[in-house]
Image: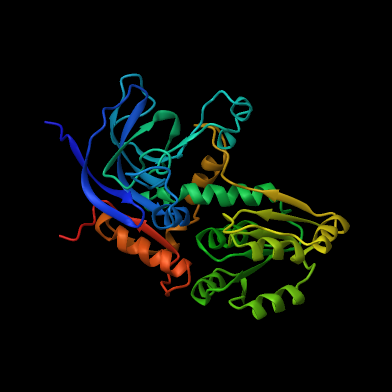
Amino acid sequence: MMINTIRAAVLEENQRVVVTNSPRVELLPDECEVTVRAVGLCSSDIARAYGNGAYFYPLIMGHELAGTVTQVGSAINEEFKEGDRVCVFPLLPCFSCLACEKKLYALCRDYDYYGSRRHGGFSEKLNVKAWNILKLPDEVALDDGALIEPTAVVLHAIEKLAVEKNKPSKICLLGAGFMGLIAVQILSRFYPDCEVFLADRNEFKLDIGSDLGAECRWIGSVNAFEDFLLEYDGCFDYVIEFAGTPETFSGAVRLAAQNSKVLWVGNISGDLVLPRTQVSSILRKELTILGVWNSIYKGDGVCDWSKAIDLIHNGLRPSELVTLRIGFDELNETLGKLYAHKTRKSVFNTIKVLVDPKITSE
């Protein structure tokens, strides 16, 4: 007999995640039921859960996920079957706007989203549109599968910069969080002629970046950041902003050399005001400033997601950056610690938290 409820971690209100039994939703013909095995905790989940960032309550968050297909909808032929190991592209495009007509689905103007605009992966099971599912090779662990979403974003960012592989160049990464460290992994492995600098205010993260091959710089005070900007003013061929602060967005422009490229990726935490002199420097240096919000996904076609899977299949290990594994019962407390760390009220050093529905406190 089918169980009619599933265990889930539900955001009931701001700063309150409760583990409960939620109703099991009927599977639609074009969906697969995915039994969730691993879910990455994204920095956007911190603001969503603890910074009044949710679109609605109650909400089941979680958009970086992998698992196993345990049921298929009636309209799905042989595309998927029970037992398939899969990852999930969390954005559901409208398929009718101008961006969707160009197959730029991540830029859809009227999208839905697992884990933010509809229920997501902090649940034992999730019904997912077949179009949003990609099979994982047997050699790709589900922990790595859950981290394909942020890995694909980083890969998209690097490819958008069009870094020349066989030409010596200097690249600066502002922000040594999970995405910044994934960028170090990719650049060190596939762009050996690129000299990678990594700057952050967290020495714990910089130590990991150093082990991965980056030249690291601590910028944890106003003076330290200004010293860094003065020392490397106009020195880098490429600058990627991952930190998400107005200061690092502005600093990226200062660090960029003439005719270089600046890429803004981080979710900015406040208003950015560029003084006239800095705007003038953008013009005089003829900078190219690019933005990245998501990644290119084309279902089962070649895209950032298929390329990310190939990278992992060939040795990239985003799961090596997982510093904490928790179950649903620990999610509320962990989000609180991450929020306190992000708002600089206390220290909670971690790179990536992975949520495993099988872990219980009992």
Of the pair 186 and 267, the residue shown nearer to us: 267
In this rendered view, identify the residue nearer to me: 18 or 350.
18
Quick one: quadrant of the C terminus?
bottom left
Q: Is residue 21 visible?
A: yes
Q: Position of residue 247 (x, y in %)?
A: 65, 66
Residue 275 found in image quarter: bottom right
**Image point 42% across, 68% down: which residue?**
340
Give the side of residue 129 with respect to residue 3, left or right. Answer: right
The relative height of residue 105 versus residue 341 in the rendered view (above or below) is above
Q: At 50% across and 55% down in the image, what residue appears?
A: 316
The image shows residue 241 at horizontal and vertical percentages of: 64, 59
- Give the image's coloring scheme: rainbow
Q: Nearer the viewer, residue 276 or 185?
A: 276
At 43% across and 75% down in the image, what residue appears? 347
Side of 25 where 156 appears, left or right:
right
Q: Residue furthest left?
A: 1
Q: Position of residue 218 (x, y in %)?
A: 60, 77
Classify residue 70 by image quadrant. Answer: top left
Is any atom of residue 324 visible in this view?
Answer: no
The answer to whether 138 appears left or right of 3 in the picture is right
Question: Quadrant of the image for the N terminus?
Answer: top left
Count of numbered circles on the image:
0
Q: Quadrant of residue 85?
A: top left
Give the residue at x 58% y 76%.
220
- Residue 122: x percent and y percent? 32, 48
Q: Nearer the viewer, residue 240 or 344?
A: 344
Q: Is residue 217 above or below residue 88?
A: below
